[in-house]
Amino acid sequence: MRALTEEETQTLFSKLANYTGRSLNNLIQPPSDSSNAGERYVFRLHASRVYYMKLSIANLATSIARDNLLSLGTCLGKFTKTGKFRLHITALDIIAPHARYKVWIKPNGEMPFLYGGNIVKAHIGRWSEDCPEHQGVVVFSMDDKPLVGDRKKVPGPVRGPVKLTLEPTSITVFRQADVGEYLREEDTLFTT
């Protein structure tokens, strides 16, 4: 387990900033009421996967051999062979509270989405104001349970006069990941 290089950190932060915006600082900085440096959260790389954990835990992990260490902290995602970063669904608990743009889907749209389908206009219940096109969003059910945390693409605005011109079957959010991924890919989710 090692700290990220400058290039890896820049790639990771640009991906996280798609979802969190300026609140990315809240993930990095220690709580203001804490004077203990061990309360600071850090990102560590192990076997091409990025983990988010307290600094004190990361320091303890240095005493464990790399071959014996499976994971530590919360897995945010992995770097591909081409150097791009792909968020995993396990990052949802970290990203959802800090999400800048959110989409809430109706109950009749939850199951098609969790089985791998995209979100159509007819399934959208609410939408964050001023969400730009091709921006990362977090999808929630109507009772504020996060369902998704990976990159979504919004083809055009769905607010204002354009909303009226979209057909109910037109895709408004492309699915990249969802909580159903735990079941569909449980065999390969944490393999290297």
Image (spheres, grey):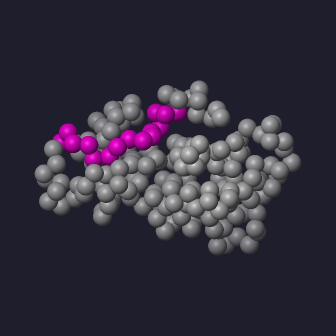
**Residue 181 is covered by the magenta coloring:** yes
Across and down, in percent, residue 121 comes to 23, 45
Q: Against 53, is 120 above or below?
A: above
**Residue 64 is covered by the magenta coloring:** no
Name which residue lies at 84% across and 42% down: 65
Overall secondary structure of the magenta section: loop
Front residue of 6 and 19: 6
Name which residue lies at 34% across and 43% down: 174
Name which residue lies at 51% across and 60% down: 14
Name which residue lies at 75% across and 53% down: 2
Residue 68 relative to residue 97: left or right = right
Across and down, in percent, residue 156 comes to 25, 55
Across and down, in percent, residue 157 comes to 25, 57
Across and down, in percent, residue 143 comes to 38, 46
Q: Can residue 84 be seen in the rendering of this structure?
A: yes
Residue 94 relative to residue 43: left or right = left
Query: How many numbered dots are placed on residues in this image?
Result: 0
The quadrant holding residue 176 is top left
Residue 11 relative to residue 140: left or right = right
Q: Quadrant of the C terminus?
A: top right
Q: Against 116, is 126 above or below?
A: below
Task: Identify the magenta region.
Answer: 168-182
Q: Can residue 93 be seen in the rendering of this structure?
A: no
